[in-house]
Amino acid sequence: MNGRPRLFGGRRAQLGVILTALLVLAGVIVLFSLTTDQRGQGFGLSGEGDAAAYASLGTQGPTFDSATSLVQALADRGVTCEGLESRPAGSGELDAGRCKIGADDVVIRVFQDPGARNRYLASIGALLGEAGVESVPRVAGPNWLVSADTDATAQLVQDSIAGELLR
């Protein structure tokens, strides 16, 4: 040894770090390719046929043009969603935000149209199904989706602004 400490324990360890980084990068590329379609729309795991399965969900209830308008509708019915923070809108979304109803974190997505909402639901359903993970309680309206930490909060949202409870 020449007196300098080895950061990663020698060439073999450095090679291991490089190979690990390459494997992680390859995994990210594969995941990205599975979750985007040819136009980069973010719904590659499910086709229009899968989205059609969601067409009849949440057709009753109001439509919204922003997360703020949805939060206002809740407030008008006595449900306070505190600390609304804007989130970057994803593919097909007009707006997105996060707030708290009681102790529950709530995520609000307002979509451009029901088709965009359906494609999102199909995409998320496919991802969760492949991962073997259950979804959080959600309420779907004609062009919106509210996700909550608990069934009770999702039920409160549904009781306030309609939509359909999804579990």
Image (cartoon, rainbow, N blue to C red):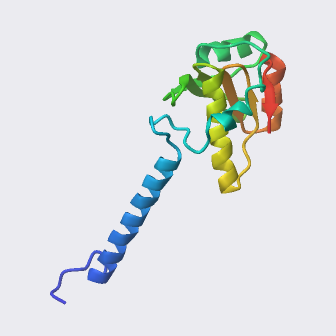
The residue lying furthest to the left in this view is 2
Give the side of residue 7 with respect to residue 95, left or right: left
Quadrant of the drawing holding the N terminus: bottom left
Q: Is residue 108 visible?
A: no
Which residue is located at x 26 percent, y 81 percent? Answer: 11
Between 23 and 161, which is closer to the camera in this rendering?
23
Which residue is located at x 77 percent, y 23 percent? Answer: 58
| Location of residue 125 in the rendering, given as x and y in whole percent from the top left corner | 68, 43
Give the side of residue 150 with respect to residue 122, left or right: right
Which residue is located at x 80 percent, y 39 percent? Answer: 167
Between 112 and 15, which is closer to the camera in this rendering?
112
Which residue is located at x 58 percent, y 16 percent? Answer: 66
Q: Is residue 96 visible?
A: yes
Up-down relation of residue 133 to residue 158 (above or below): below
Between 4 and 22, which is closer to the camera in this rendering?
22
The residue lying furthest to the top in this view is 76
| Location of residue 40 in the rendering, given as x and y in whole percent from the top left corner | 45, 37
Which quadrant would residue 123 be assigned to in this image?
A: top right
| Location of residue 119 in the rendering, given as x and y in whole percent from the top left corner | 62, 32
The total of numbered circles placed on residues is 0
Which quadrant would residue 19 be assigned to in this image?
A: bottom left
Which quadrant would residue 151 be assigned to in this image?
A: top right
| Location of residue 64 in the rendering, given as x and y in whole percent from the top left corner | 64, 13
Give the side of residue 149 with respect to residue 12, left or right: right
The residue lying furthest to the front in this view is 49
